Image (cartoon, grey):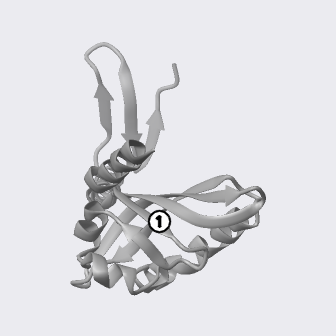
Amino acid sequence: MLNFINRFEQAFHYSPIGMAILSLEGKWLKVNPALTDMTGYAEEELLSINFQAITHPDDLEEDMKPLHELIEGEKAAYEMEKRYIHKNGNIVWILLSVSVVREGDQPLFLISQIQNITVRKQLECELVESEERFRNLITNLPDPVVVHDGEVILFWILSGVISLRIF
């Protein structure tokens, strides 16, 4: 049994994603280095607060509903995207996966896996902005435009209206 516990401790510690064990009220009980790196808080700092303290205020209510459903046994787990506030004040987008450990019907504690998706969210935002700029450019062209792949017309624009070819 001791060997298994040591292996679990090593897996928890060396995991490349944030991992945490939390009380049912959301207090951090155990955190790994990936989570401390992600949030900028030292382990001791995180262990002295709850997850609500670093959750972006606009995301807190959305996070609490599935958490209560999880604790009440209405869900086995939940996953969501939300924001943490890094110790330096920056926003960190995360993909949060949470499950509850039970003894019988009694919930004991929460297990969370936390992945930093900030770069992905920034790229998604840049893509939306780029698509909007392209759409504005295309719809405001004074001349008709035909886009083709050399053989087939893919779409055309006439008087600011985009028409897609349907295959």
Q: Nearer the viewer, residue 66 or 20?
A: 20
The quarter holding residue 49 reads: bottom left
Label 1 CA crowd tier, 10 Å (few <14, some 14–19, many 20+):
many
Left or right relative to 18: residue 14: left
Taking 6 as reference, is 111 above or below it?
below
Taking 52 as reference, is 14 above or below it?
above
Left or right relative to 130: residue 115: right
Left or right relative to 68: residue 91: left
Q: Position of residue 70 (x, y in %)?
A: 68, 63
Q: Position of residue 148 (x, y in %)?
A: 30, 24
Q: Nearer the viewer, residue 51 or 83?
A: 51
Residue hosting label 1: 21
Q: Position of residue 166 (x, y in %)?
A: 52, 24
| Element on which disc 1 rests | strand
Q: The residue under label 1 is which amino acid type?
A: Ile
Q: Residue at x 71, y 56 (%)?
A: 75
Q: Nearer the viewer, residue 58 or 100?
A: 100
Q: Position of residue 44 (x, y in %)?
A: 30, 81
